[in-house]
Image (spheres, grey):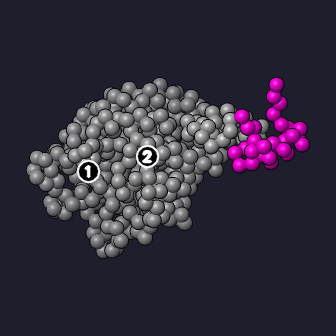
Amino acid sequence: MTQLKKALEGEVTAEMRQVAQSEGVTAEFIREGVAAGTMVIPRNVRHSIANPVAIGTGLRTKVSASIGLHGGEAAIPEELAKITAAVDAGTNAIMDLSVSGDIDAMRRAALALSPVPVGTLPLYQALAEAGQKYGSTAKMKVEDLFAVIERHASDGVDFLAMHCGTTMDIVERAKKDGRIDPLVSYGGSHLIGWMIYNQAENPLYTNYDRVLEIARRYGATISLADGMRPGCLADSLDGPQVQELVVLGELVRRAREAGVQVMVKGPGHVPLNQLKATVTLQKSLCKGAPYFVFGPVVTDIAAGYDHISAAIGGAISAWAGAEFLCYVTASEHISLPDAHQVREGVMASRIAAHAADLARGLPGAAEWDLEISQARKVLDWKKQIELSIDPDRAGRLRKERSDDASEGCAMCGKYCAMKVVSEYLGTARQTC
């Protein structure tokens, strides 16, 4: 029985109790959110998770990091090192988006290593296998696709991302609307290519009940991916994107009726002035389902710095109501990230998430900032570093660039204004 089914029957599960303790809320609050569909706890019955998480309304904003095999040079040990880097940096979830190599081995290794929920996009593997088996991804069989979905779920994948709402009507709408970047979603573009080649409707849409049956059997959460994700600011909130959101809203309803937890994956490129409207529209059309946003990046010019652009977009989106941020690394759009960039991307998204939690007045969020401010006031460098979001980096910068013996700040040294004023006001730290 799924978390949703149990919540609807009034049962508080062990996972609900665990995430309630982590969030500082009551287990009943979590149960009510899961029952309403405004929260999800991604947790496959076949995956033992040391740190289960709840994603949704009234909870801390969560962050996901993506890894995976891409190209002939990719190696499983390197991707596992990225998982370790992401977990050490505080990610709340991992997504394995492998498209080549031994995808089964990669996924199973990720599930064995990760102490947080793991998500996948089964279509990627189905396409890769079709290319090997038939010489073309467009020749993928529907049964091949569902065999891969079953394999991922039975291995223990906690949330399955799938483009179930990308229909032929929406593809025709995109053709008429004249997008700048017609398709930027890897899975969405290949799926649409399959649909056009075979002159057939999206099999994930026509067989959606089958998708739900697999998810229900293993307790997996469905993450409804958006095939019409805008890939540039000029395409944001266009007709195809909004039309797909309408379809996804209907699929959310059907998932809940089937007892399957569901969230919705959101756009990647959104200008600042459209972020709030985008989140509000999703929340309305998709019936309050948790919103999993890819960044979003707020400018198209930030190649090499997209983790910063995404942190800006993520903070505003989460403040507006999105609950789950898919990190973006500095390598986005130009290359694949290494472990250092993975860590950097997680940290940027975590900062964005916390900034949003502060703006939303989430209980407990401001206390962290207040505590570090009090340490800064009395020039307690050790405590400031300990309380920072990345103590390793903060400590290293302090050691590299400042005199450890100095009590003043890094900018002013012995003429530190905070030190002078604190002494005058009688609030300076007392030392032995």
Q: What's the residue at 43%, 37% (across, down)?
A: 85
Comparing 353 with 166, the one in front is 353
Where disc 2 sits, the SS reads: helix
Position of the N terminus by quadrant: top left
Q: Position of residue 157 (x, y in %)?
A: 33, 35
Judged left or right of residue 184, residue 422 is right
User: What stretch of residues is rendered in magenta?
Assistant: 405-432
Judged left or right of residue 369, residue 261 is left
Where disc 1 sits, the SS reads: helix
* Relative height, residue 405 to residue 180 (above, below): above
Tell me the crowding category of disc 2: few under 14, some 14 to 19, or many 20 or more residues within 10 angstroms, Cα based: some
| Quarter assignment of residue 267 | bottom left
Labelled disc at residue 341 = 2
Q: What's the residue at 16%, 62% (across, down)?
A: 197
- Is 414 colored magenta in this rendering? yes
Q: Which mark sits nearer the N-terminus, 2 or 1? A: 1
Judged left or right of residue 25, residue 144 is left
Q: CA distance from mark 2 to mark 1?
A: 33 Å
Amino acid type, callout 1 = Leu
Comparing 262 with 311, the one in front is 311
Tell me the crowding category of disc 1: few under 14, some 14 to 19, or many 20 or more residues within 10 angstroms, Cα based: many
Q: Are marks 2 and 1 in contact (CB under 8 Å)?
A: no
Comparing 264 with 316, the one in front is 316
Q: What's the residue at 38%, 63% (across, down)?
A: 231
Q: Is residue 153 visible?
A: no
| Quarter assignment of residue 146 | top left
Q: Position of residue 343 (x, y in %)?
A: 46, 42
Q: How many badges with numbers are in the image?
A: 2
Q: Nearer the viewer, mark 2 or mark 1?
A: 2
Q: What's the residue at 39%, 31% (across, down)?
A: 114
* Relative height, residue 142 to residue 13 (above, below): below
Q: Which residue is mark 1?
A: 204
